Image (spheres, rainbow, N blue to C red):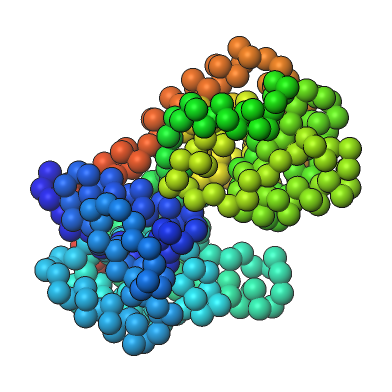
Protein backbone atom coordinates (compact mmCIF):
# COMPACT_ATOMS: atom_id res chain seq x y z
CA UNK A 1 0.00 0.00 0.00
CA UNK A 2 1.40 3.41 -0.96
CA UNK A 3 2.51 6.03 1.52
CA UNK A 4 -0.30 8.41 2.45
CA UNK A 5 -0.63 11.82 4.07
CA UNK A 6 -3.17 12.02 6.88
CA UNK A 7 -4.64 15.14 8.52
CA UNK A 8 -6.28 14.34 11.86
CA UNK A 9 -8.36 17.14 13.40
CA UNK A 10 -8.75 16.61 17.13
CA UNK A 11 -9.91 18.81 20.03
CA UNK A 12 -7.00 17.60 22.17
CA UNK A 13 -3.65 15.85 22.10
CA UNK A 14 -1.07 14.85 24.74
CA UNK A 15 0.22 16.20 27.03
CA UNK A 16 -3.36 17.41 27.39
CA UNK A 17 -5.38 14.84 29.34
CA UNK A 18 -8.32 13.28 27.54
CA UNK A 19 -9.48 10.04 25.98
CA UNK A 20 -9.81 11.43 22.45
CA UNK A 21 -6.30 12.88 22.57
CA UNK A 22 -4.85 9.59 23.79
CA UNK A 23 -6.67 7.74 21.00
CA UNK A 24 -5.34 10.16 18.36
CA UNK A 25 -1.83 9.77 19.76
CA UNK A 26 -1.94 5.99 19.34
CA UNK A 27 -3.58 6.08 15.91
CA UNK A 28 -1.25 8.77 14.54
CA UNK A 29 1.88 6.97 15.67
CA UNK A 30 0.67 3.62 14.34
CA UNK A 31 -0.02 5.17 10.92
CA UNK A 32 3.40 6.80 11.08
CA UNK A 33 5.08 3.49 11.92
CA UNK A 34 3.53 2.10 8.75
CA UNK A 35 5.35 4.75 6.72
CA UNK A 36 2.60 7.33 6.36
CA UNK A 37 3.01 11.07 6.92
CA UNK A 38 0.70 12.16 9.73
CA UNK A 39 -0.31 15.69 10.78
CA UNK A 40 -2.44 16.32 13.86
CA UNK A 41 -4.31 19.63 13.98
CA UNK A 42 -5.45 20.36 17.52
CA UNK A 43 -6.02 22.94 20.21
CA UNK A 44 -3.61 23.69 23.03
CA UNK A 45 -0.95 26.23 23.87
CA UNK A 46 1.91 26.74 21.45
CA UNK A 47 4.24 26.18 24.40
CA UNK A 48 2.85 22.68 25.04
CA UNK A 49 5.54 20.15 25.73
CA UNK A 50 6.42 18.27 22.51
CA UNK A 51 5.47 14.61 22.23
CA UNK A 52 8.26 12.39 20.88
CA UNK A 53 7.66 10.63 17.59
CA UNK A 54 7.41 11.09 13.86
CA UNK A 55 3.98 12.75 13.95
CA UNK A 56 3.84 16.48 13.23
CA UNK A 57 1.54 18.25 15.69
CA UNK A 58 0.06 21.68 14.85
CA UNK A 59 -1.58 23.31 17.88
CA UNK A 60 -3.45 26.02 15.97
CA UNK A 61 -7.15 25.34 16.49
CA UNK A 62 -7.26 27.97 19.23
CA UNK A 63 -10.88 28.79 20.09
CA UNK A 64 -12.05 27.80 16.60
CA UNK A 65 -12.86 31.41 15.81
CA UNK A 66 -13.20 32.51 12.16
CA UNK A 67 -9.59 33.71 12.29
CA UNK A 68 -8.44 30.35 13.71
CA UNK A 69 -10.31 28.44 11.00
CA UNK A 70 -8.94 30.70 8.27
CA UNK A 71 -5.43 30.04 9.53
CA UNK A 72 -6.07 26.29 9.65
CA UNK A 73 -7.42 26.41 6.10
CA UNK A 74 -4.33 28.21 4.82
CA UNK A 75 -2.08 25.61 6.46
CA UNK A 76 -4.05 22.71 4.98
CA UNK A 77 -3.94 24.31 1.54
CA UNK A 78 -0.15 23.90 1.55
CA UNK A 79 -0.67 20.16 1.04
CA UNK A 80 -1.69 18.55 -2.26
CA UNK A 81 -5.18 17.27 -3.02
CA UNK A 82 -6.80 15.01 -2.11
CA UNK A 83 -6.19 15.87 1.53
CA UNK A 84 -7.31 12.94 3.68
CA UNK A 85 -8.92 14.51 6.77
CA UNK A 86 -10.08 12.45 9.75
CA UNK A 87 -12.29 14.53 12.04
CA UNK A 88 -12.52 13.24 15.60
CA UNK A 89 -16.10 14.06 16.49
CA UNK A 90 -17.28 14.82 20.01
CA UNK A 91 -19.75 17.73 19.78
CA UNK A 92 -19.03 19.19 23.20
CA UNK A 93 -15.26 19.24 22.55
CA UNK A 94 -15.29 21.98 19.91
CA UNK A 95 -16.36 24.88 22.07
CA UNK A 96 -19.27 27.29 21.63
CA UNK A 97 -21.12 25.44 24.43
CA UNK A 98 -21.09 22.34 22.21
CA UNK A 99 -23.00 24.19 19.45
CA UNK A 100 -20.22 25.18 17.06
CA UNK A 101 -22.31 25.26 13.89
CA UNK A 102 -19.81 27.54 12.04
CA UNK A 103 -17.08 24.92 12.49
CA UNK A 104 -19.31 22.29 10.85
CA UNK A 105 -20.04 24.60 7.92
CA UNK A 106 -16.31 25.23 7.63
CA UNK A 107 -15.77 21.47 7.38
CA UNK A 108 -18.48 21.38 4.68
CA UNK A 109 -16.63 24.08 2.73
CA UNK A 110 -13.36 22.17 3.05
CA UNK A 111 -14.98 19.07 1.57
CA UNK A 112 -17.24 20.63 -1.07
CA UNK A 113 -15.16 23.64 -2.16
CA UNK A 114 -11.54 22.95 -1.23
CA UNK A 115 -11.81 19.31 -2.32
CA UNK A 116 -10.76 17.65 0.94
CA UNK A 117 -11.63 13.97 1.40
CA UNK A 118 -13.40 13.94 4.77
CA UNK A 119 -13.89 10.97 7.07
CA UNK A 120 -15.48 11.33 10.50
CA UNK A 121 -14.70 9.22 13.55
CA UNK A 122 -17.78 9.46 15.79
CA UNK A 123 -16.82 9.11 19.43
CA UNK A 124 -20.06 10.70 20.68
CA UNK A 125 -23.08 11.49 18.44
CA UNK A 126 -25.23 14.12 20.13
CA UNK A 127 -27.18 14.87 23.29
CA UNK A 128 -30.51 13.15 23.82
CA UNK A 129 -33.79 15.04 24.03
CA UNK A 130 -35.82 15.30 27.21
CA UNK A 131 -33.04 14.35 29.62
CA UNK A 132 -32.47 17.78 31.10
CA UNK A 133 -33.41 21.44 30.85
CA UNK A 134 -34.71 23.30 27.81
CA UNK A 135 -31.11 24.40 27.20
CA UNK A 136 -30.06 20.77 26.79
CA UNK A 137 -32.97 20.20 24.42
CA UNK A 138 -31.82 23.21 22.39
CA UNK A 139 -28.27 21.83 22.29
CA UNK A 140 -29.64 18.43 21.25
CA UNK A 141 -31.48 20.08 18.34
CA UNK A 142 -28.40 22.03 17.26
CA UNK A 143 -26.28 18.86 17.47
CA UNK A 144 -28.56 17.25 14.90
CA UNK A 145 -28.22 20.23 12.59
CA UNK A 146 -24.45 19.91 12.92
CA UNK A 147 -24.73 16.19 12.14
CA UNK A 148 -26.68 16.90 8.93
CA UNK A 149 -24.03 19.39 7.79
CA UNK A 150 -21.14 17.04 8.54
CA UNK A 151 -22.75 14.02 6.85
CA UNK A 152 -23.44 16.15 3.78
CA UNK A 153 -19.68 16.77 3.59
CA UNK A 154 -18.26 13.37 4.58
CA UNK A 155 -17.21 10.57 2.25
CA UNK A 156 -17.34 8.02 5.07
CA UNK A 157 -17.97 7.69 8.80
CA UNK A 158 -16.58 5.40 11.43
CA UNK A 159 -18.34 4.78 14.75
CA UNK A 160 -16.88 3.70 18.06
CA UNK A 161 -19.91 1.46 18.66
CA UNK A 162 -22.57 0.17 16.22
CA UNK A 163 -25.15 2.03 18.27
CA UNK A 164 -23.87 5.36 16.91
CA UNK A 165 -24.49 4.26 13.31
CA UNK A 166 -28.17 3.80 14.09
CA UNK A 167 -28.21 7.24 15.70
CA UNK A 168 -26.39 9.11 12.91
CA UNK A 169 -27.47 7.38 9.69
CA UNK A 170 -30.95 8.96 9.41
CA UNK A 171 -29.30 12.41 9.34
CA UNK A 172 -27.53 11.60 6.06
CA UNK A 173 -30.96 12.38 4.54
CA UNK A 174 -30.68 9.56 1.98
CA UNK A 175 -27.23 10.66 0.86
CA UNK A 176 -24.98 7.61 0.56
CA UNK A 177 -22.38 7.68 3.35
CA UNK A 178 -20.77 4.33 4.19
CA UNK A 179 -20.54 3.63 7.91
CA UNK A 180 -18.14 1.18 9.53
CA UNK A 181 -17.56 0.09 13.10
CA UNK A 182 -14.05 1.04 14.17
CA UNK A 183 -13.54 -0.01 17.80
CA UNK A 184 -11.46 2.16 20.06
CA UNK A 185 -8.19 0.78 21.40
CA UNK A 186 -7.06 1.01 24.96
CA UNK A 187 -5.42 4.39 25.46
CA UNK A 188 -3.00 2.88 27.99
CA UNK A 189 -0.02 1.07 26.41
CA UNK A 190 0.85 -2.22 28.13
CA UNK A 191 4.34 -1.67 29.59
CA UNK A 192 4.90 -4.90 31.53
CA UNK A 193 7.09 -3.42 34.28
CA UNK A 194 7.34 -6.29 36.78
CA UNK A 195 9.47 -4.31 39.23
CA UNK A 196 6.92 -1.47 39.37
CA UNK A 197 4.10 -3.96 39.90
CA UNK A 198 5.93 -5.54 42.84
CA UNK A 199 6.55 -2.13 44.39
CA UNK A 200 2.88 -1.19 44.05
CA UNK A 201 1.69 -4.49 45.51
CA UNK A 202 3.95 -3.97 48.51
CA UNK A 203 2.46 -0.50 48.97
CA UNK A 204 -1.24 -1.29 48.56
CA UNK A 205 -1.41 -4.93 49.72
CA UNK A 206 1.49 -5.50 52.14
CA UNK A 207 -0.23 -8.50 53.77
CA UNK A 208 -1.02 -10.23 50.49
CA UNK A 209 -4.53 -8.85 50.11
CA UNK A 210 -6.41 -9.15 46.84
CA UNK A 211 -6.52 -5.84 44.98
CA UNK A 212 -9.86 -4.81 43.48
CA UNK A 213 -9.37 -1.93 41.06
CA UNK A 214 -11.55 0.56 39.23
CA UNK A 215 -10.27 2.69 36.36
CA UNK A 216 -12.18 5.78 35.27
CA UNK A 217 -12.84 9.46 35.79
CA UNK A 218 -15.14 8.96 38.82
CA UNK A 219 -18.02 10.96 37.45
CA UNK A 220 -21.78 10.55 37.56
CA UNK A 221 -23.56 8.15 36.93
CA UNK A 222 -20.89 5.53 37.62
CA UNK A 223 -19.93 6.70 41.13
CA UNK A 224 -23.37 5.96 42.65
CA UNK A 225 -22.95 2.37 41.44
CA UNK A 226 -19.47 2.15 42.98
CA UNK A 227 -20.76 3.59 46.27
CA UNK A 228 -22.95 0.49 46.63
CA UNK A 229 -20.52 -2.06 45.24
CA UNK A 230 -17.32 -1.16 47.09
CA UNK A 231 -18.63 -1.43 50.70
CA UNK A 232 -20.33 -4.73 49.86
CA UNK A 233 -17.09 -6.19 48.51
CA UNK A 234 -14.96 -4.96 51.41
CA UNK A 235 -17.46 -6.23 53.96
CA UNK A 236 -17.62 -9.67 52.35
CA UNK A 237 -13.87 -9.96 51.74
CA UNK A 238 -11.75 -8.79 54.71
CA UNK A 239 -8.70 -9.93 52.73
CA UNK A 240 -9.30 -7.37 49.94
CA UNK A 241 -8.35 -3.75 49.32
CA UNK A 242 -9.70 -1.36 46.69
CA UNK A 243 -7.62 0.81 44.36
CA UNK A 244 -9.18 3.76 42.52
CA UNK A 245 -7.19 4.67 39.40
CA UNK A 246 -7.91 7.93 37.61
CA UNK A 247 -8.82 11.60 37.98
CA UNK A 248 -10.94 12.51 41.02
CA UNK A 249 -10.26 9.11 42.54
CA UNK A 250 -8.90 10.65 45.78
CA UNK A 251 -11.99 12.85 46.16
CA UNK A 252 -14.27 9.88 45.61
CA UNK A 253 -12.28 7.83 48.11
CA UNK A 254 -12.85 10.52 50.75
CA UNK A 255 -16.57 10.45 50.00
CA UNK A 256 -16.81 6.72 50.66
CA UNK A 257 -14.60 6.87 53.74
CA UNK A 258 -16.77 9.62 55.25
CA UNK A 259 -19.76 7.28 55.07
CA UNK A 260 -17.82 4.12 55.97
CA UNK A 261 -14.79 5.11 58.09
CA UNK A 262 -14.07 1.45 58.92
CA UNK A 263 -12.62 1.11 55.39
CA UNK A 264 -10.20 4.03 55.80
CA UNK A 265 -7.05 1.93 55.44
CA UNK A 266 -8.40 -0.39 52.76
CA UNK A 267 -9.24 2.07 49.99
CA UNK A 268 -6.46 3.71 47.98
CA UNK A 269 -6.51 6.21 45.11
CA UNK A 270 -3.94 7.41 42.59
CA UNK A 271 -5.37 10.56 41.06
CA UNK A 272 -4.69 11.37 37.40
CA UNK A 273 -1.88 9.44 35.72
CA UNK A 274 -0.88 10.20 32.08
CA UNK A 275 -1.92 7.34 29.82
CA UNK A 276 1.29 7.42 27.82
CA UNK A 277 3.50 6.91 30.87
CA UNK A 278 4.26 3.51 32.37
CA UNK A 279 2.97 4.32 35.85
CA UNK A 280 -0.66 3.95 34.82
CA UNK A 281 0.01 0.60 33.13
CA UNK A 282 1.71 -0.68 36.29
CA UNK A 283 -1.29 0.28 38.44
CA UNK A 284 -3.65 -1.60 36.15
CA UNK A 285 -1.37 -4.63 36.03
CA UNK A 286 -1.25 -4.96 39.82
CA UNK A 287 -5.03 -5.39 40.20
CA UNK A 288 -6.37 -8.90 40.73
CA UNK A 289 -9.94 -8.01 39.67
CA UNK A 290 -11.30 -4.87 38.00
CA UNK A 291 -14.82 -3.61 38.69
CA UNK A 292 -16.13 -1.57 35.74
CA UNK A 293 -19.89 -0.93 36.08
CA UNK A 294 -21.74 1.16 33.45
CA UNK A 295 -25.42 2.15 33.65
CA UNK A 296 -25.93 1.40 29.94
CA UNK A 297 -23.71 -1.67 29.98
CA UNK A 298 -20.23 -2.56 28.73
CA UNK A 299 -19.50 -1.46 25.16
CA UNK A 300 -16.64 -1.08 22.73
CA UNK A 301 -16.58 2.71 23.23
CA UNK A 302 -15.60 2.40 26.91
CA UNK A 303 -11.83 2.90 26.95
CA UNK A 304 -11.91 2.53 30.74
CA UNK A 305 -13.02 -1.06 30.06
CA UNK A 306 -10.57 -1.67 27.21
CA UNK A 307 -7.49 -0.66 29.23
CA UNK A 308 -7.82 -3.46 31.82
CA UNK A 309 -8.88 -5.83 29.02
CA UNK A 310 -5.63 -5.11 27.16
CA UNK A 311 -3.71 -5.76 30.38
CA UNK A 312 -5.37 -9.15 30.81
CA UNK A 313 -7.13 -8.18 34.02
CA UNK A 314 -10.20 -10.20 35.09
CA UNK A 315 -13.17 -7.84 34.85
CA UNK A 316 -16.62 -7.70 36.37
CA UNK A 317 -18.87 -5.34 34.42
CA UNK A 318 -22.52 -4.78 33.48
CA UNK A 319 -24.71 -5.60 30.52
CA UNK A 320 -27.27 -3.17 29.16
CA UNK A 321 -28.67 -1.38 26.12
CA UNK A 322 -25.21 -0.46 24.78
CA UNK A 323 -23.64 -3.91 25.17
CA UNK A 324 -22.59 -5.53 21.89
CA UNK A 325 -22.95 -9.32 21.42
CA UNK A 326 -19.18 -9.90 21.48
CA UNK A 327 -19.08 -9.37 25.26
CA UNK A 328 -21.54 -12.16 25.96
CA UNK A 329 -20.07 -14.47 23.33
CA UNK A 330 -16.62 -14.43 24.92
CA UNK A 331 -15.47 -15.39 28.41
CA UNK A 332 -13.37 -12.25 28.65
CA UNK A 333 -15.60 -10.51 31.21
CA UNK A 334 -18.16 -11.39 33.85
CA UNK A 335 -21.23 -9.30 33.01
CA UNK A 336 -24.31 -8.90 35.20
CA UNK A 337 -27.44 -6.80 34.51
CA UNK A 338 -26.71 -3.13 35.14
CA UNK A 339 -29.28 -2.77 37.90
CA UNK A 340 -28.21 -5.78 39.97
CA UNK A 341 -25.43 -4.32 42.11
CA UNK A 342 -25.76 -6.98 44.82
CA UNK A 343 -24.99 -9.66 42.26
CA UNK A 344 -22.19 -7.50 40.89
CA UNK A 345 -20.51 -7.47 44.32
CA UNK A 346 -21.07 -11.22 44.74
CA UNK A 347 -19.46 -11.97 41.36
CA UNK A 348 -16.51 -9.76 42.28
CA UNK A 349 -15.98 -11.71 45.51
CA UNK A 350 -16.35 -15.03 43.69
CA UNK A 351 -13.79 -14.09 41.04
CA UNK A 352 -11.41 -12.73 43.67
CA UNK A 353 -11.39 -16.13 45.36
CA UNK A 354 -11.06 -18.26 42.20
CA UNK A 355 -7.56 -18.10 40.72
CA UNK A 356 -8.38 -20.55 37.92
CA UNK A 357 -11.32 -18.42 36.80
CA UNK A 358 -9.13 -15.30 36.88
CA UNK A 359 -6.48 -16.94 34.70
CA UNK A 360 -9.14 -18.09 32.23
CA UNK A 361 -10.64 -14.59 32.07
CA UNK A 362 -7.18 -13.06 31.61
CA UNK A 363 -6.38 -15.26 28.60
CA UNK A 364 -9.81 -14.72 27.03
CA UNK A 365 -9.55 -10.97 27.55
CA UNK A 366 -6.19 -10.72 25.82
CA UNK A 367 -7.47 -12.78 22.89
CA UNK A 368 -10.60 -10.64 22.53
CA UNK A 369 -8.57 -7.46 22.66
CA UNK A 370 -6.13 -8.67 19.99
CA UNK A 371 -9.00 -9.68 17.72
CA UNK A 372 -10.98 -6.44 17.82
CA UNK A 373 -9.25 -3.60 19.63
CA UNK A 374 -5.49 -3.64 19.02
CA UNK A 375 -4.29 -0.37 17.51
CA UNK A 376 -2.48 -2.28 14.75
CA UNK A 377 -5.78 -3.79 13.59
CA UNK A 378 -7.57 -0.43 13.84
CA UNK A 379 -4.96 1.39 11.74
CA UNK A 380 -4.98 -1.42 9.18
CA UNK A 381 -8.77 -1.24 8.93
CA UNK A 382 -8.75 2.54 8.52
CA UNK A 383 -6.15 2.45 5.77
CA UNK A 384 -7.92 -0.37 3.93
CA UNK A 385 -11.36 1.24 4.24
CA UNK A 386 -10.17 4.61 2.98
CA UNK A 387 -7.47 3.78 0.51
CA UNK A 388 -8.22 0.33 -0.91
CA UNK A 389 -11.97 0.48 -1.34
CA UNK A 390 -13.69 2.20 -4.23
CA UNK A 391 -14.86 5.62 -3.12
CA UNK A 392 -18.60 6.25 -3.52
CA UNK A 393 -19.71 9.25 -5.48
CA UNK A 394 -20.75 12.22 -3.35
CA UNK A 395 -24.02 12.32 -5.28
CA UNK A 396 -24.78 8.60 -5.02
CA UNK A 397 -28.14 8.01 -3.33
CA UNK A 398 -29.55 5.10 -1.43
CA UNK A 399 -31.68 2.98 -3.72
**Can I make out residue 236 in this image?**
yes
**Can I make out residue 389 in this image?**
no
Coordinates of residue 281 in the picture (x, y in percent): 50, 38
In the picture, measured across the screen, residue 274 lies left or right of residue 396, that is right
Q: Nearer the viewer, residue 357 or 105?
A: 357
Residue situated furthest bottom in the rendering: 67
Quadrant in the picture for residue 152: bottom left
In the picture, measured across the screen, residue 103 lies left or right of residue 338, that is left
Q: Work out whether 301 lies above or below 376.
A: below
Coordinates of residue 371 in the picture (x, y in percent): 38, 30
Q: Nearer the viewer, residue 302 or 356?
A: 356
Q: Work out whether 306 lies above or below 285.
A: below
- Residue at 69 percent across and 78 percent down: it is 134
Q: Nearer the viewer, residue 171 or 356?
A: 356
- Residue at 19 percent across and 65 percent down: it is 83
In the picture, measured across the screen, residue 211 lies left or right of residue 175, that is right
Question: Considering the image in quadrants, where does the N terminus appear?
Answer: top left
Coordinates of residue 139 in the picture (x, y in percent): 58, 75
Question: Considering the image in quadrants, where does the C terminus appear?
Answer: bottom left
Quadrant in the picture for residue 334: top right
- Residue at 43 percent across and 25 percent down: it is 367
Q: Nearer the viewer, residue 180 or 237?
A: 237
- Residue at 49 percent across and 68 percent down: it is 93
Amino acid sequence: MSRQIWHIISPEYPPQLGGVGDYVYLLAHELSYRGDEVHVWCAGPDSAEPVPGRVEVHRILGRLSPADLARLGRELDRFPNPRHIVLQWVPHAYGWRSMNVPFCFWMWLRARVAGDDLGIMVHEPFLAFWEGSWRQNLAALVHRVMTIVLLNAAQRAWVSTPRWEKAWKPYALRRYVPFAWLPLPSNVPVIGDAAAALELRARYAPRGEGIVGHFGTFGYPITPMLEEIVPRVLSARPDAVVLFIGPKGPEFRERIVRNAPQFQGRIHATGALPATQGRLSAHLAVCDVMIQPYPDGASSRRTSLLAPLAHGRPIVTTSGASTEPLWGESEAVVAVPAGDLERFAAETCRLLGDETARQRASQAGKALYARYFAIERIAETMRATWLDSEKPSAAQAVV
